[in-house]
Image: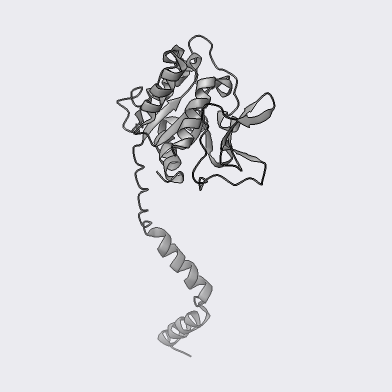
């Protein structure tokens, strides 16, 4: 009769023999679990966008909506997440009721030192005469361009407005290097700037002979509310300047 020790040893041997050994798949899952328990490597911080000198072009009837953008750096001054606001060089539209020739000089002077022109788009901005001039002059001097729709910004007088057309779609550069304006269903030479561009902007696609290319084809358009302009305006203006080589 076998001894107790021999029986116990046999049982141990038998148990050792039938115990499943870890497979390569088991080892792979074990390695993955170890990796999952380790903290992820820190991501590099995104570079801080440059603070640009920005000219804001807008229709004065939208002044209450415009102030959502102009005062973005003041509305929530105690908020730690507040972003820097591009330095403001706007020209209020009521000043534009002066002599046209003098007004052009004033606008040209206010554009000096800026690298970006931001068009704040309300319902009727696209058809304003002097908004078009500010865009055309900005384009001619090489400023970066962008459009920001502000119709969803509440106005104490009119509430929420309807979205207007992008004013950048109503000015274009022609195959002949001249600036064009869309009027009454057609494209015509822009009379306020007769000079030709000396070089084609790298950000604007070239049209075929006899055609024009609207400025909206090479520029970005945003919605202040939907795209969180409060936090992103600084990045938008910096991107527009870089695209224009400024």
Give coordinates of residue 120: x percent, y percent: 49, 26
Looking at the image, residue 126 lies above or below residue 205:
above
Name the residue rendered at 49%, 79% in the picture: 15
For residue 178, which quarter of the picture? top right
**How is the structure coloured here?**
one colour
Q: Nearer the viewer, residue 172 or 177?
A: 177
Looking at the image, residue 197 lies above or below residue 168:
below
| 208 displayed left or right of 89 | right
Name the residue rendered at 51%, 41% in the picture: 197
Looking at the image, residue 188 lies above or below residue 175:
above
Q: How many marks?
A: 0
Q: Nearer the viewer, residue 242 or 178?
A: 178
Name the quarter where the C terminus is drawn.
top left
Q: Nearer the viewer, residue 13 or 152?
A: 152
Q: Nearer the viewer, residue 243 or 110?
A: 110
Name the residue rendered at 46%, 45% in the picture: 243
Give coordinates of residue 162: x percent, y percent: 60, 20
Q: Residue furthest bottom?
A: 1
Residue 224 seen in render:
no
Give coordinates of residue 242: x percent, y percent: 42, 45
| 72 displayed left or right of 145 | left
Residue 140 seen in render:
yes
Name the residue rendered at 68%, 29% in the picture: 186
Give coordinates of residue 100: x percent, y percent: 47, 17
Looking at the image, residue 18 lies above or below residue 228:
below
């Amino acid at each position: 009769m076998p001894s107790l020790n021999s029986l116990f040893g046999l049982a141990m041997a038998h148990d050792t023999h039938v115990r499943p050994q870890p497979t390569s798949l088991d080892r792979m899952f074990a390695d993955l679990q170890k990796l999952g328990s380790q903290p992820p490597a820190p991501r590099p911080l995104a570079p801080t966008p440059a603070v640009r000198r920005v000219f804001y072009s807008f229709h004065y009837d939208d002044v209450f909506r415009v102030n959502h953008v102009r005062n973005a750096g003041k509305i929530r001054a105690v908020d730690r997440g507040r972003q820097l606001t591009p330095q403001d060089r706007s020209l209020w539209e009521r000043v534009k009721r002066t002599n046209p020739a003098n007004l052009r000089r004033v606008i040209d002077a206010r554009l000096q030192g800026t690298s970006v022109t931001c068009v704040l788009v309300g319902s009727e901005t696209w058809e304003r005469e002097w908004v078009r001039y500010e865009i055309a002059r900005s384009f001619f001097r090489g400023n970066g361009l962008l459009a920001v729709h502000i119709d969803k910004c509440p106005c104490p007088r009119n509430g929420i407005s309807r979205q207007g057309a992008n004013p950048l779609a109503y000015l274009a550069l022609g195959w002949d290097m001249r600036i064009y304006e869309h009027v009454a269903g057609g494209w015509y030479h822009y009379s306020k700037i007769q000079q030709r561009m000396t070089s084609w902007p790298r950000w604007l696609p070239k049209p075929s002979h006899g055609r024009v290319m609207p400025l909206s084809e090479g520029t970005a358009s945003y919605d202040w509310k939907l795209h969180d302009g409060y936090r992103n305006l600084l990045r938008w203006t910096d991107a527009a300047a870089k695209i224009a080589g400024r």
